Image: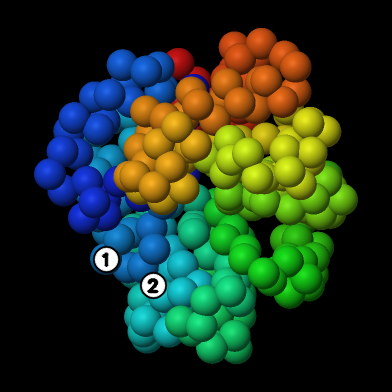
Amino acid sequence: MIDSHAHIDLPAFNKDRDQVITRARERGIHSIINVGLDLESSQASLKLTQAYPDIFAAVGFHPNRASQMMDGNLKSLAELAADSRVVAIGEIGLDFYRKATPHQCQTEVFQQQLNLAAELGLPVIIHCRQAHKEVLDILTPWVKSVSNPASNNFERGVIHCFSGELELAKRYFELGFLVSLAGSVTYPSAHDLIKAARELPLDRLLVETDSPFLAPQLHRGRRNEPSYIPLVVNKLAQIKGVPAEMVAQATAQNTINLFHLPNG
């Protein structure tokens, strides 16, 4: 299993980070993608990869921190991304639920980071909350501008913590994106998400914890961590009526393929 999206650089893990990573390994977690939220977090993510060989990094500015991106920060992200342990630009996108950053600023920073990803040939990790129309309006021309019709490698990135309906997922699939499911798929009240998960094709799915956020139902209200990925995998297997091993292997291979991780 692979946790395709975590934030174990955050202070919530300062007291027991080693133990958290050890627990993940003991539960069969092959790799963890630690995802940046701003420049400092991106630097911390890369530092983690130097200490733990099973952790890889994504670097970027979260939309709620877009206003913190200063002149020169884009170049700094590019310099971080030159390291082979950085496998994506993220998390980037739009968040119109919170009022932390003006929409125009979010949009500009999102587009700048998409262009950076295209220049570097890296996939993107997309955060989208209450802004799917706007995200699709940005991604559609961007994908067209960077796509090579002669290439079969059409996977541009992943919509992290997907919570929409099947038809919305299909629109992202058409653009070459995968979707990732988190602990929210285990919530009894997540009827629409569970309905969509039942129909989502395994070859387009990743799983994640978004640690320390969004703990699965069994640990809801407490800190999330990568060792809880089996709870997401098992729930998804139950929803789809297939063996958990099938979900674990498929989502892990999808993650390996998307981020070009070592396969072994």
Front position in the image: 216 or 80: 216
When asked about the image quadrant of residue 180, the answer is: top right
Front position in the image: 161 or 158: 161
Tell me: 202 left or right of 13: right
Which residue is denoted by mark 2 in the rendering?
A: 75
On the question of residue 212 being in view, the answer is: yes
Which residue is denoted by mark 1 in the rendering?
A: 40
CB within 8 Å, label 2 to label 1? no
Tell me: 183 left or right of 215: right
Q: Position of residue 127 (x, y in %)?
A: 57, 61
Residue beneath the point at 65% across and 45% down: 189
Q: Amino acid at mark 1?
A: Glu
Q: Of circles 2 and 1, which is in front?
A: 1
Q: Quadrant of the C terminus?
A: top left
Q: How many marks?
A: 2
Front position in the image: 178 or 223: 223
Q: Amino acid at mark 2?
A: Lys
Within 10 Å of the Cα at label 2, are there few (<14), some (14-19), or many (20+) other Cα atoms?
few
Q: Position of residue 11 (x, y in %)?
A: 21, 55
